[in-house]
Image (spheres, grey):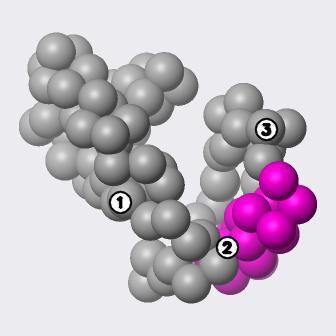
Amino acid sequence: MRGGIPIIDYLEVGHYYGVEPRAKAMAEGRKELAESKLEHKQPHLTVSENLGELSLGREFDFLWAFSVLIHLEDPILENVIRFAARHLKSGGVFLC
């Protein structure tokens, strides 16, 4: 949530989608969300170990991977790229 909190604060209710592979990290993120008093923004937070199989059922104008891609092993990075390709609108942007 290091990058997510200011974005959640900026976006309209329900417009933030966050994905995290580690349940423990997501629990900490939810704690930060509560501490920031932003739960009313109703972000969609998902724990998924395999982005290659995850479908959020919608497309996005922007996807943002905050300081994570350089830390990923190639097979995981490939899943991230597949996820982005499936979830970006035509003309959408993947920021990393």
- Disc on res. 46: 1
Describe the element under mark 3 as helix, strand or loop: helix
The residue lying toward the viewer, choosing from 26 and 6, is 26
- Disc on res. 87: none
Residue span colored magenta: 73-91
- Which image quarter is the C terminus in? top right
For badge 3, the amino acid type reads His
**Residue at the spot 14% in from the left edge and 35% down from the top edge:** 39
2 or 1: tag closer to the N-terminus: 1
For badge 2, the amino acid type reads Phe
For badge 1, the amino acid type reads Thr
Asked if residue 50 lies in the magenta stretch, the reply is no
- Which image quarter is the N terminus in? top left
Contact (CB < 8 A) between labels 2 and 1? no
- Any part of residue 23 in sight: yes
The residue indicated by pointer 2 is 83
What's the CA distance linking mark 2 and mark 3? Answer: 17 Å
Give x and y (percent) for residue 72.
78, 48
The residue indicated by pointer 3 is 71
Q: Is residue 49 shown above or below 94? A: below
Q: In the rendered view, does 6 fall on the left or right side of 88?
A: left
**Residue at the spot 33% in from the left edge and 49% down from the top edge:** 23
Asked if residue 85 lies in the magenta stretch, the reply is yes
Give x and y (percent) for residue 18.
44, 50
**Residue at the spot 49% in from the left edge and 82% down from the top edge:** 55
Q: Is residue 53 shown above or below 93? A: below
What's the CA distance linking mark 2 and mark 1? Answer: 14 Å
